[in-house]
Amino acid sequence: MRLASSYHPVLFYTTAVTVSITNFSSEMQEQTIYWFPATTYGWGWGIPNTWQGWLVLAVYSAGLLVSSLLLDPQIYPKSFSFVVVFLSGLLLIICWKKGEPTRWRWGKK
């Protein structure tokens, strides 16, 4: 004897799981937490608002401190400049990837 409806438990389960995974992933995309918020005025990023952002900033500061201690800027100006440019470029890339999309801002509107 067949049921009148075409209900199949396996198909129903996979459809329900697919729908719930799709809803979960779309909710996760809406809740993007930026490590570095955009500034209120001008272009760029402000102080970090997550622990990951503070960690990146602490590692950047420690790298500058260590490089200034190991590579005396007066004795090794080219090497010190290279390290500063490299660390600053790395910080800029991280801010670009993990920070709020930036544009020129004239304040809160």
Image (spheres, grey):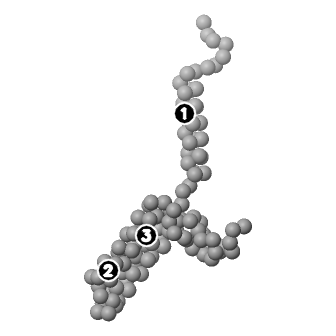
- Circle 3/circle 2 CB separation < 8 Å: no
- Type of amino acid under label 1: Val
Q: Could you say whether the residue bearing mark 3 is in a helix, strand or loop?
A: helix
Image quadrant occupied by the N terminus? top right
Nearest to N terminus: mark 1 or mark 2: 1
The answer to which of 23 and 4 lies nearer the viewer is 23
Q: Residues within 10 Å of mark 3 (few under 14, many from 20)?
A: some
Q: Is residue 97 visible?
A: no
Image quadrant occupied by the C terminus? bottom right
Circle 3 residue: 57
* Distance (Cα) linking label 3 and label 1: 40 Å
The answer to which of 78 and 74 lies nearer the viewer is 74
* Distance (Cα) linking label 3 and label 2: 15 Å
**Residue 4 drawn above or below residue 47:** above
- Type of amino acid under label 2: Ser
- Seen at 38% across and 86% down, the residue is 81
Q: Residues within 10 Å of mark 1 (few under 14, many from 20)?
A: few
Residue 8 x %, y %: 58, 21
Q: Could you say whether the residue bearing mark 2 is in a helix, strand or loop?
A: helix
User: Which numbered marker is on residue 67?
Assistant: 2
**Residue 2 drawn above or below residue 87:** above
User: Which numbered marker is on residue 64?
Assistant: none
User: Which numbered marker is on residue 17?
Assistant: 1
**Residue 5 drawn above or below residue 63:** above
Residue 69 x %, y %: 29, 82
Residue 59 x %, y %: 37, 69
- Type of amino acid under label 3: Leu
Q: Specify the quadrant of the image occupied by residue 60.
A: bottom left
- Seen at 47% across and 67% down, the residue is 94
